[in-house]
Image (cartoon, rainbow, N blue to C red):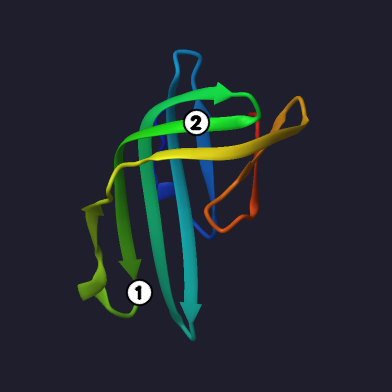
């Protein structure tokens, strides 16, 4: 399933892990300063595997899109450096996956 960046709003994201070992992830972070809104949307694709209680992601391509409502000159897209990620995970229920992010916070993804 391809994810459409035009549908991103607020803070949150999607993570798709397919049976063939490929993943697609989209994370949107929105900040506000008065009436100004800035969104950083990161879209990444690559491979995944489980290593015990760790989700190992091998990012092959990552792209960031910036949208600034008050400073349109900041708007644009750029590639991000690709990297391998190792995320501690747990499954609170059969339909939920919780992954630790870069800041040590737990991010929860629910199966559709």
Residue 1: x %, y % from top left: 44, 26
Residue found at the very far bottom of the displayed protein: 34
Q: Nearer the viewer, mark 1 or mark 2?
A: 2
Helix, strand or loop under label 2:
strand
Q: Can residue 4 be seen in this snapshot? A: yes
Q: Is residue 8 above or below residue 91?
A: below
**In this rendering, would 79 be left or right of 107?**
left
The residue to which callout 1 is attached is 69
User: Which quadrant of the figure has residue 37?
Assistant: bottom left
The x, y position of residue 85, in whole percent, is 45, 40
Residue positioned 55% across, 31% down in the render: 55
Please tell me whether mark 1 sits on a helix, a strand or a loop: loop
Q: Is residue 18 above or below residue 4?
A: above
Q: Is residue 97 visible?
A: no
Question: Which residue position holds label 2?
Answer: 56
Local crowd size for mark 2, using a 10 Å CA cut-off: few (<14), some (14–19), many (≥20): some
Q: Residue at x 25, y 66 (%)?
A: 75
Quadrant showing the C terminus: top right
């Amino acid at each position: 399933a391809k994810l459409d960046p035009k549908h991103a709003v607020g803070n949150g994201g999607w993570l798709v892990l397919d049976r063939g070992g490929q993943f697609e992830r989209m994370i949107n972070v929105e900040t506000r300063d008065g009436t100004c809104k800035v969104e950083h949307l990161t879209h990444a694709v690559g491979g995944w595997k489980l290593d015990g209680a760790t989700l190992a992601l091998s990012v092959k391509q990552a792209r960031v899109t910036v949208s600034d409502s008050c400073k349109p000159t900041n708007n644009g897209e750029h590639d991000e450096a690709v990297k391998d990620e190792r995320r501690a995970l747990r499954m609170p229920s059969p339909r939920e996956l919780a992954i630790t992010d870069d800041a040590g916070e737990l991010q929860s993804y629910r199966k559709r």
